[in-house]
Amino acid sequence: MQVIYHHTSSLRTNLLWMSGYIDLEGNSKGVIHPELGEIHTDAALRRPMRDFPPLVWFTTRIAVPACLQQSTIMLLDKVTGETRAIDGPEGSSNAIALNRLALGFPIASIPVTPWPEHAGYSSPEGQGLNDSARAVGDNPDDWWVSNSPVDLLQMSEIWVSPRIANPKLQRSDHYLIDVRRMVTACRANPSAYIPPSWMPTSRAVRLAERIGVPAIQSRGGLVRD
């Protein structure tokens, strides 16, 4: 059974577990970083998004792709509203993302296509994306894509890096069990809320108490429903 991996980070996992799906690129909401405040990502910064529609991206490799460890930081002038892009220093992408994760799915269980067989692969935009990936040591021929959101309950593996700097992913079967429980709980009760994973448990419990909802603790976080 061949498994492919979608790479994400603990900055976004609570949003993923609540939605129950990996959404198409460009549809992600802003997230709250414990040090930097609200952060937005923009697929348009990575590609023009003209030659092919938004996709969900996977790779056959568990290790964090090198292209995801590079970053462009958009600085916002709160007075003028103007933005300015700068290349993030080495390691900044990992620092911002917090703990890296790879979510594994059996190819047979989700609607995916090998990226080299997708029409976007040979488009000008796709070729530019491929060239930039190869330039940092990634192989786009290992990528797979989906044209539609992917159901997280089809996931068969989770790999997590306990370290932020120089991430090394380790398989965590107990976390996979917790994630399935959280996704199922949120589907049963759409008002359920999972705090960011970086929030201390004691703080999350106090927050739940203040707003008058019960907290369900798990090793992967708190589900409040």
Image (spheres, rainbow, N blue to C red):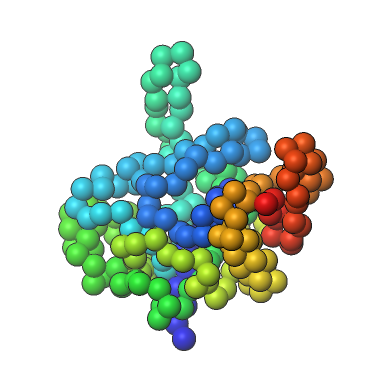
Residue at image position (45%, 19%) is 77
* Residue at the limit of the structure toward the top, as seen here: 79
- Above or below, 69 against 119 in this view is above
Q: Residue at left 35%, top 41%?
A: 45
Q: Residue at x 33, y 58 (%)?
A: 55
The residue located at (60%, 55%) in the rendering is 189
Q: Residue furthest bottom?
A: 1
- Image coords of residue 103 (percent x, y): 53, 66
Quadrant housing residue 99:
bottom right
Say which quarter of the image contains residue 82. top left
**Camera-side residue of 108 and 96:** 108
Please tell me whether residue 189 is drawn above or below residue 78 in the rendered image.
below
- Left or right of residue 87: residue 120: left
Looking at the picture, how far across and down is residue 182, in whole percent?
63, 61
- Tell me, yes or no, if residue 101 can be seen here: no
Residue in the foreground of this view, choosing between 39 and 92: 39
